[in-house]
C-alpha cells in the first residue's frame, strides 16, 4: 500500500504510486476510492456545559454567545479551515466523482491528486501553526469582543496544548475500486449516472458564473478543459463519454485562447454549457444520436467567420446547421437561466429532442 500520509515530495509520490500499480496491475486504466479527513477544534463550548458557570451575570447579548455555544477564540484563528475545505472541494470536483461519503479517483490522476493534497496539507499546517503561535492573542481578542464573558472564556477555553492536539489532516488509504462488483447488478448504471451528474453540475456552475457576463475569462475555458480531462479519466466507467470529451475539444479548438468578448462566441458557449448541464441531453450524446454529427458541423460553422456563422440570435446545438431562434435570448443583458432553459427546451422539443 502507499503510505499516503508520509509521502511528501514528487519523487516519493511517483515512487509510491509505481509500487501500488505494480501490486495492483489490474488498476491500470481503473480507479481507487479515497478521501481526506480534516478535524480540529471549533473554538466553541456548548452552552449546556457552561450554564452553571454563568451565575447572575446576563451574557445573552454578548457577541461570543450563540444560541447553542460560546465562542472562546477569535474566528480568525480558524479561518484556514474554510480555506482548506474549499481547496479540497475544488480538487474533488476536478479529479473525482462521489462514492457515498468518499471519492472515486482514476489511477492516472493519483499523482496529481496527492500533489495537490500535499499543497493543501501545507496550508492546513501553516494555519494550525499560526493559531498556536498566536493562541493567547486570539483568546484575548475574543475576550475584548465580549468583555462580560472574559472570565467565562478563560474558564472554558482549551489549553494551548490540548487545542493543538485536536487538529488532524489524514488521507484515506487508496482502496481498489471496481464499478462492476460492489453493489450488485445496477452498480455499473449507478456510476455511469453519477458521472453524468458530475458533468452536469460542473457545466451548470460554469453557466451560472457566466450568465450575466458580457466577457468570459480564461478561467472558464480552463475549467472546461479540466472537465474534458476528467471525462477522459473516467472512460473506464463508460467509454461512450469520449463523445462528450470530443465535443468539448471541438469547442476548445475553435475558441480564442484568452478571454471571450465576441457576442457570438459567448452565445455559443453559454448554450453549450446550458445543454451540457442537462443529464438527459448528455445521455443523447452518449447514445450516438445521429444529430450529433450535424451539431458538430454547426458548432464549427458558428465559430467561423464565413457565411455559415451565426451572426445574431441564439445558436441552439442539435437543431441543425445554420439554425437560430427568431429573437436573441442571450444578448448583452442575459435573462434568467430558467427563461433561457425554457426557450432552449421548447426549440429542442420542436426538433424532436
Image (cartoon, rainbow, N blue to C red):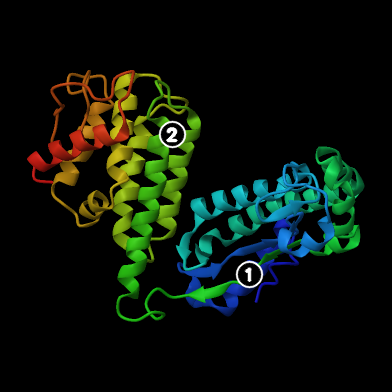
Query: Which type of secondary structure does the marked residue at label 2 adopt?
Result: helix
Which residue is rendered at x = 19% and y = 54% of the image? Answer: 288
Is any part of residue 97 visible from this angle? Answer: yes
Q: Residues within 10 Å of mark 1 (few under 14, many from 20)?
A: some
Q: How crowded is mark 2: few (under 14 residues within 10 Å), some or many (20 or more)?
A: few
Mark drawn on residue 118: none
- Spot occupied by residue 337 in the image (x, y as percentages of width and height): 31, 34
Q: In front here: 114 or 57?
A: 57
| Distance from Cα at disc 2 to Cα at disc 1 | 32 Å
- Spot occupied by residue 93 in the image (x, y as percentages of width and height): 50, 52
- Quadrant where the N terminus sits is bottom right
Q: In front here: 273 or 63?
A: 63
Mark drawn on residue 172: 1
- Spot occupied by residue 299 in the image (x, y as percentages of width and height): 24, 33
Query: Which type of secondary structure does the marked residue at label 1 adopt?
Result: loop
Q: Name the residue under label 2.
A: 209
Q: In the orientation shown, which residue stands out farthest toward the front?
A: 56
The mark that comes first in sequence, 2 or 1, is 1
Mark 2 or 1: the one toward you = 2
Which residue is rendered at x = 49% and y = 73% of the image? Answer: 27
Quarter-of-image position of residue 192: bottom left
Amino acid at each position: 500500500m502507499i503510505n499516503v500520509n508520509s509521502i511528501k515530495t514528487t519523487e516519493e509520490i511517483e515512487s509510491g504510486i509505481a509500487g501500488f500499480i505494480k501490486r495492483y496491475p489490474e488498476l491500470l486504466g481503473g480507479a481507487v476510492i479515497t478521501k481526506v479527513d480534516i478535524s480540529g477544534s471549533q473554538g466553541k463550548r456548548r452552552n449546556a456545559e457552561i450554564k452553571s458557570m454563568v451565575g447572575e451575570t446576563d451574557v445573552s447579548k454578548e457577541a461570543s454567545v450563540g444560541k447553542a455555544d460560546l465562542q472562546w477564540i477569535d474566528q480568525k484563528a480558524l479561518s484556514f479551515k474554510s480555506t482548506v475545505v474549499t481547496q479540497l472541494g475544488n480538487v474533488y470536483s476536478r479529479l473525482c466523482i462521489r462514492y457515498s461519503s468518499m471519492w472515486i479517483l482514476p489511477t492516472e490522476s493519483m499523482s496529481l491528486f496527492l500533489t495537490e493534497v500535499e499543497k493543501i496539507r501545507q496550508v492546513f499546517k501553516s494555519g494550525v501553526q499560526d493559531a498556536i503561535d498566536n493562541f493567547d492573542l486570539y483568546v484575548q481578542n475574543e475576550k475584548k469582543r465580549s468583555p462580560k464573558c472574559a472570565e467565562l472564556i478563560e474558564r472554558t477555553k482549551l489549553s494551548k496544548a490540548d487545542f493543538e492536539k485536536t487538529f488532524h489532516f489524514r488521507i484515506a488509504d487508496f482502496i481498489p475500486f471496481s464499478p462492476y462488483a460492489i453493489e450488485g447488478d445496477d452498480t455499473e448504471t449507478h456510476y455511469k449516472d453519477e458521472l453524468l451528474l458530475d458533468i452536469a453540475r460542473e457545466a451548470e456552475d460554469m453557466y451560472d458564473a457566466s450568465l450575466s457576463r458580457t466577457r468570459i475569462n480564461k478561467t472558464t475555458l480552463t475549467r472546461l478543459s479540466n472537465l474534458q480531462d476528467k471525462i477522459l479519466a473516467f472512460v473506464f466507467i463508460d467509454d461512450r463519454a469520449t463523445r462528450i470529451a470530443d465535443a468539448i475539444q471541438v469547442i476548445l479548438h475553435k475558441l480564442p485562447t484568452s478571454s471571450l468578448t465576441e457576442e457570438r462566441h459567448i452565445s455559443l458557449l453559454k448554450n453549450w454549457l446550458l445543454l451540457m448541464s442537462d443529464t438527459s441531453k448528455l445521455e443523447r450524446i452518449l447514445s450516438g444520436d445521429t444529430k450529433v454529427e450535424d451539431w458538430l458541423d454547426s458548432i464549427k460553422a458558428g465559430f467561423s467567420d464565413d457565411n455559415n456563422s451565426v451572426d445574431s440570435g441564439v445558436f441552439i446545438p442539435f437543431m441543425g446547421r445554420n439554425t437560430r431562434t427568431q429573437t436573441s435570448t442571450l444578448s448583452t443583458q442575459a435573462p434568467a437561466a430558467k427563461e433561457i432553459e425554457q426557450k432552449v427546451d421548447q426549440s429542442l422539443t420542436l426538433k424532436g429532442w
